[in-house]
Amino acid sequence: MDPLSREFQEKVHRESLMVRTDLVIEMQVPGRSHASQIPLIWIDALPKPEVATLWQKHEQYGEGDQLIRWLYFLNSETPDESTFYLDIQVTIPNVLHVQYFIAFPVLEHEELIERLTRVSEFSVMTDPGEEYKKLMQGKERQRIDAAQLHLLRQGLMYECPSEADRQELQKMLNQWRRSAGRRKR
């Protein structure tokens, strides 16, 4: 399906999963001289059970192949209604192929989108679990330490699209800011 077609845009909007919350962890990754900041993005995967259980397939069969790209639906007439989407496709040969979209209404997730322009990886979480809910009670953002990394079990690490794609994301975010009359935070 042509990504520019009205039919494809409606499919993305209709099938997209919503971000519940996000936070950043700082983690020392083997082979790197400094700690990395890794955004964790919790999504509501209930509408797509194959996404909610994807982490289990990864544990059982391995990571498989990932294809990730950004889609930009800018609304020039009403910029506050603009939404960016992550189009994520995961293929585990002879096991499954899953495609899903995560919606980032720009007005609501401007800070998170900005953060994603600066990192090389992120994690998508499908179930925050009770411990995470307790940790986040009354807090919008939180850094977790190494002792709490078991919270990541029900998440999947993804490499961000290429540097050129991250630059394009920044360019589109800046274009949205100009159209909405906003300045960079």
Image: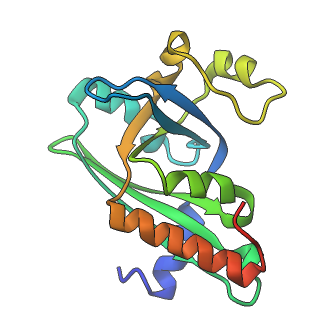
Q: Residue at x 58, y 57 (%)?
A: 113
Q: Is residue 22 left or right of residue 141?
A: left
Q: Position of residue 175 (x, y in %)?
A: 61, 80
Q: Is residue 125 above or below residue 153?
A: below
Q: Quadrant of the C terminus?
A: bottom right
Q: Residue at x 58, y 35 (%)?
A: 24
Q: Position of residue 182 (x, y in %)?
A: 77, 73
Q: Residue at x 59, y 43 (%)?
A: 43
- Return the residue found at the far front: 33
160 and 185: which is toward the camera: 185
Q: Position of residue 41 (x, y in %)?
A: 56, 41
Q: Quadrant of the N terminus?
A: bottom left
- Return the residue found at the far bottom: 77
Residue 103 seen: yes
166 and 154: which is toward the camera: 166
Q: Position of residue 13 (x, y in %)?
A: 58, 69
Q: Is residue 44 above or below residue 114?
A: above
Q: Is residue 139 left or right of residue 123?
A: right
Rendered image quadrant of residue 59: top left
The image's colour scheme reads rainbow
- Return the residue found at the far top: 147
Residue 17 seen: no
Q: Is residue 96 above or below residue 133?
A: below
Q: Is residue 55 left or right of residue 133?
A: left
Q: Is residue 98 above or below residue 3?
A: above
Rendered image quadrant of residue 23: top right
- Return the residue found at the far left: 94
Q: Is residue 56 left or right of residue 75?
A: left
- Number of callouts in the render? 0
181 and 138: which is toward the camera: 181
